Amino acid sequence: MSRNLPPLNALKTFEASARLGSFVLAAAELDVTPGAVAQQIKKLEDFYGRQLFIRRNNQLYLTEVALGVQAVAAGMMDELAQLTERLVAGAVRSNLILSVLPSVGVRWMNRHLPEFLATHPEIRIDLRLEEDPIDFYRNRVDVRLSYGEHLYPDFITVPFRSDSVTPMCRPEFISSGRLDPARPDSLRDEDLIHVNWRVGFSSYPDWSAWLAGQGVERWPRQELGHTTDTSSLAIDLASAGCGIALGQSILAEDELAAKRLVMPFAYHLPLQYDYCAVYPKSNERSPPIRAFVAWLTAQRNREAATATQGAVVL
């Protein structure tokens, strides 16, 4: 729906004339001639079909209609002036609406995002934890961190992190003799923590796939162990000593670094898809989005070398 707006240059001229009470003073402020001011006022009067000024004893008086126009025009000009001042001073902050998978948000993004914000203090983040798929336009999302490139085929997709899964448990779990790090088949069904991946995550490997990669043809009985539908909760359960989880490196960085969790086996099973930043093509030129995606790409280069380091075999 098109807007029925008055000629804005004429409105600017009217506001100056009404505020200063003189075409001559308005002309001086706007750096034009008094005749040019008169022409702009005539244009605005023609647009509204109403007289705006009355000359009396070499003074300008506003008509009743002009008083209403002046109130709106003055407020609009003041707001534009304040916005311009903030822009010129560099104080205007850019907002970035970021939608993230819950596990990635609470296990990875919350630990790394402060680095991005420290290098881009002009950006303010609106961080949302959501499952796929999302509606970019209804929710006004700028960037989505998603698993795989297949969910949003019409959007720009930039991979930023590969990942893998491997068994993770407390060090005491191994020292107690509940498993033998030299024998993957020593894993007991009652000690396994399973993740029921949600829609869109069917490509995540399970315990049978990891065991098959170790040459063990076995389908563990899920009902004998613990089960959760969130990968971060599986890591929490393992950290609490409730069993051994098939954990993701990206989600267990802190636990592995602090040795609250160890990886008793050297074999890592890569995930089928990368984690990706997804955003509409219409946002391609947005400075906050470009800065965020560039930071993610740098993270990928820096973290690829350490994603699977720190395996501890006892």
Image (spheres, rainbow, N blue to C red):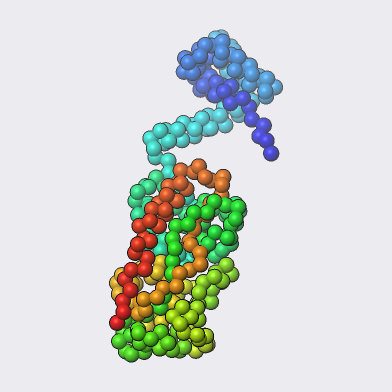
Residue 300 position, x and y percent, is 40, 57
Is residue 16 at least partly visible in the picture?
yes
Is residue 18 at least partly visible in the picture?
no
> Which sits in the foreground, 290 or 30?
290
Q: Is residue 46 found left or right of 81 in the rendered image?
A: right
Residue 141 position, x and y percent, is 54, 53
Residue 284 position, x and y percent, is 52, 45
Q: Is residue 86 above or below residue 240?
A: above
Q: Is residue 264 above or below residue 23?
A: below
Tell me the quarter of the image containing the C terminus: bottom left
Q: Is residue 222 above or below residue 95?
A: below
Residue at 56 percent of width and 47 percent of height: 281
Residue at 53 percent of width and 11 percent of height: 34
Tell me the quarter of the image containing the N terminus: top right
Residue at 46 percent of width and 78 percent of height: 213
Residue 282 position, x and y percent, is 56, 45
